[in-house]
């Protein structure tokens, strides 16, 4: 019978697991960059400068900036 331990040995499982790790790393990097936005705004940087400097989508930066103002 095919068991979980057998599944974990397959290349499909290993590749899917690695893809999940890479995606989690990218999401964590993105979140870290977005956490910098309020600080950069407090230093006088514009939304455009922040987006360009952190290689973020300008709309993401605007959303964080709007939340920071409230």
Image (cartoon, helix red, strand yellow):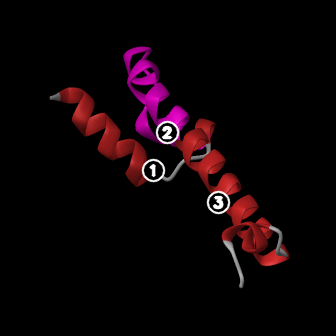
Query: Where does the image place residue 10, in percent across and percent down from the top left?
Result: 82, 75
Q: Nearer the viewer, mark 2 or mark 3?
A: 3
Residue at screen point 26% across, 28% down: 68
Mark 2 or mark 3, earlier in chain:
3
In 3D space, how far apart are the residues under numbered discs 2 and 3 (Cα atoms)? 16 Å
The residue under label 2 is 31
In 3D space, how far apart are the residues under numbered discs 3 and 1 (Cα atoms)? 26 Å
Q: Nearer the viewer, residue 13 or 37?
A: 13
Residue at screen point 24% across, 38% down: 66
Point out which mark residue 20 bears: 3
Q: Nearer the viewer, mark 1 or mark 2?
A: 2
Left or right of residue 65, residue 37 in this image: right
The residue under label 1 is 58
- Write down the quadrant of residue 12 in the picture: bottom right
In the image, farthest residue toward the front: 1
Query: Where does the image place residue 16, in percent across and percent down from the top left?
Result: 71, 69
Give the magenta-colored segment's residue range: 31-52
In the image, farthest residue toward the top: 43
In the image, farthest residue toward the bottom: 1
Secondary structure category for the residue under label 2: helix
Residue at screen point 83% across, 69% down: 9
Query: Where does the image place residue 35, in percent across and percent down from the top left?
Result: 45, 29
Left or right of residue 31, residue 59 in this image: left
Q: Quadrant of the C terminus?
A: top left
Q: Is residue 32 magenta?
A: yes
């Amino acid at each position: 019978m095919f068991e979980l331990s057998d599944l974990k040995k397959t290349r499909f499982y290993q590749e899917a697991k690695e893809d999940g790790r890479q995606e989690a790393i990218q999401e964590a990097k993105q979140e870290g960059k977005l956490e910098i936005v309020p600080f950069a705004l407090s230093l006088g940087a514009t939304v455009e400068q922040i987006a360009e400097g952190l290689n973020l989508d300008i709309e993401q930066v605007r959303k964080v900036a709007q939340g920071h103002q409230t």
